[in-house]
Image: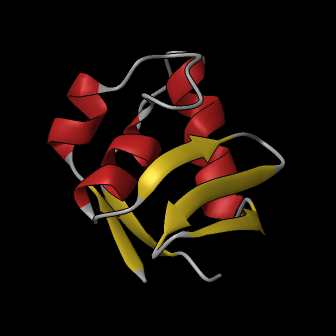
Amino acid sequence: MKIQVTEKHIRSGVRGSCSSDPISLAMKDAGLLKPWVSPDHITWDENHRHHSVQTPNSVLFFIQEFDNNGRVVPFEFILEG
């Protein structure tokens, strides 16, 4: 599934939050439930199933930049699981 992180998600995201960061907000907008994003893994619920995957490098870089007040821009990534 393609997840698109928009400027809106970036503006609304909460630094240091695993469930209200821009990635999680984008996942919610894509219809995924209970997204949780950490440096190690991403989890969510979909169709009454719990999913967990290793955090892609592009997402890890984004999270680190966002949490440290770095410059981040909209991007997209593929969430497999």
Q: Is residue 22 above or below residue 53?
A: above
At a point 55% along the width and 21% down the height, the residue shown is: 17
At a point 19% along the width and 42% down the height, the residue shown is: 7
Quarter assignment of residue 42: bottom right
Residue 24 picture location, percent across and down:
44, 44
- Figure colour scheme: secondary structure
Q: Is residue 79 above or below residue 20?
A: below
Q: Is residue 70 left or right of residue 73?
A: right
Residue 73 picture location, percent across and down:
33, 46
**Nearer to us in this view, 68 or 25:** 25
Residue 53 picture location, percent across and down:
75, 68
At a point 43% along the width and 83% down the height, the residue shown is: 1
Quarter assignment of residue 29: bottom left
Badge count: 0
- Check the image and name the residue furthest to the front: 48
**Nearer to us in this view, 64 or 54:** 54
Residue 5 picture location, percent across and down:
31, 54
**Nearer to us in this view, 57 or 44:** 44
At a point 59% along the width and 37% down the height, the residue shown is: 63
Q: Is residue 32 left or right of residue 45?
A: left
Q: Is residue 5 above or below residue 71?
A: below
On-image quarter of the C terminus: bottom right
- Check the image and name the residue furthest to the left: 8
